[in-house]
Image (cartoon, rainbow, N blue to C red):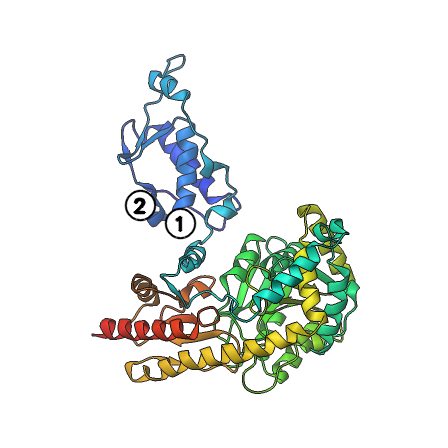
Amino acid sequence: MDINIDKNSKIPVYLQIINEMKGKILSGELVAGQDLPSIRMMANMLHLHRNTVARAYGELEAEGLIQCIPGLGCKVRRQRSYGEKDCDQEKASSRQKVNWLAQIREEYLDMKVNFDDLFQRIQGDDVISMGSSIASPEIYDERKMAEALAFIVSDKRKIQNVHCPYKGDKTLRANLVKFLATKGVKASIGNIQVMPEINQALDFVVTLLVGKGDTVIIEEPISPDVYRIMELAGANIRTIPVDEEGMNPLALEKMVQQLKPKLIFVSSSYNDPTGVILPVERRQKIVDISNRYQIPIIEEDVASELVYRGKKQQPLKAYDTGDNVIYIYSFYLTFVPGQSMAFVVANKEIVKRISYLVSMRMIYVNGNSQKLIARFLQDGSYEIALEKLRQTYGKKQEIVCNALDKMKDMGISYKKPDGGVLIWCKLPKGLDSKAFINIAYQKGITLYPGYVFYPRQNGGRDYIRICYSYETEERLQKGMIILRQILEEELN
């Protein structure tokens, strides 16, 4: 059966399928009782996601044009004459279910969920988590944390603990101003918007700035969370390959001149997944490009404080004399798991609009977590914890890298970062990362395959991402032994 689909058409693909098949059924080209391709088969034929085909089939079935029976497949229904009753349909009418796939908006049907499915694998003590980047739970003193929380919740002004200003707790923002000064960033509390976590912060900024069809430039490879937020905004995503020093300013400027993008996204310190960090010269040049072409930069920073060798780099925002950089910092890897937070530093007009979105979409803003982080920033506990984290993560990095060094004769290769919590590791020739991580999971360790970090999944098939932040040193050593055993078995 020939179905002609134009993916460049403004008509949604699922509607094109419906229109084509409806025309063939009503014209008699497809006759009653004729078997139709399964949803999976049709998706493969048309090179579409099966959810798109499922939505089209669901609409056709709702119109009484086809009938799909689980386990038996789909067929063309006999079309009733005028006035003729369909007894079977009448019997079934009382138990008809909503076709949920037909109700879901098109852009959410084809969402790639493999990254999320992989994230769920971290659950349980029987699996050694070397995939997801989660802060180490062993750094912060439990007793001190409990005392701090007890003090906060016992405050008589309880309403202020439950609800805080939409921009964020004022004490926290005042302390963030001081924290930013240590990073070379000048800001006032009016330039800061506190958010529960980093993906939400990025989502709100993209919601404000990016419309359907707007071109955005991002790095590649990159965290799936970033490109999925851009995709759902309807952005035209263009990528610049990351080399050993991050985004190349020469390639960036050439692309800016050609495409005139709406914004540029940069992960400045220890890019996820490669672990590379932009040197000072590139930071300055990228900001200069932003200034000259008046294009905003979104700078994401999760790991800049986690430096084990060399000097800590100032963020791009520190070189931003034109107020063109929107800086997003996260405590995700440096504070207590479950109590993390992020904040945005930007032009006051941007902050004002983000705050408006917060007021519209979040009736409750967690004040206790904000006061907790403010307390740790104010009394110096956060800086003490950062030093412990650097020592702890640095030791864990050595465990992973020493084990990988012993596998180099098997074809493993990688570049050791100066900080962060990730190792971007190339597998021996002939091994596919998708198959490899599934075997690893069966053996008791979780890893991420490289292809999920490419928006079109057109690279990274021979890479895996290893994260060493969460597990203890003992479990990491055990995990690396298992990884070596899998390599030996696969190569043999």
x, y percentage for residue 384?
63, 77
Disc 1 packing (10 Å; few <14; some 14–19; many ≥20) = some
x and y percent of residue 15 in the render? 47, 39
Can residue 209 be seen in the rendering of this structure? no
Is residue 369 found left or right of 306 in the rendered image? right
User: Measured from the top left, where is residue 286 in percent x and y?
Assistant: 64, 76
Q: Is residue 63 left or right of residue 431?
A: right
For residue 131, what is the image quadrant?
bottom left
Please report the residue visible at 76 percent of the width from the left and 56 percent of the height from the top. Answer: 352
Q: Earlier in the sequence, mark 2 or mark 1?
A: 2
Residue 435 image-quadrant placement: bottom left
Tally of numbered discs:
2
**For the residue labelled by badge 1, is the local secondary structure a helix, a strand or a loop?**
loop
Q: Which residue is mark 2?
A: 41
Secondary structure under the numbered disc 2 in the rendered image: helix
Q: Amino acid at mark 1?
A: Leu
Q: CA distance from mark 2 to mark 1?
A: 10 Å
Q: Where is 262 relative to 316, above or below?
A: above
Q: Looking at this rendering, what residue extends furthest in the bottom direction?
A: 310
Quadrant, the N terminus: top left
User: What is the number of the mark on residue 461?
Assistant: none
Mark 1 highlights which residue?
Answer: 48
Amino acid marked by disc 2: Met
The residue lying at 74 percent from left, 76 percent from top is: 181
Q: Kindly identify the residue that appears in the image at 45 percent across and 54 percent down.
A: 112
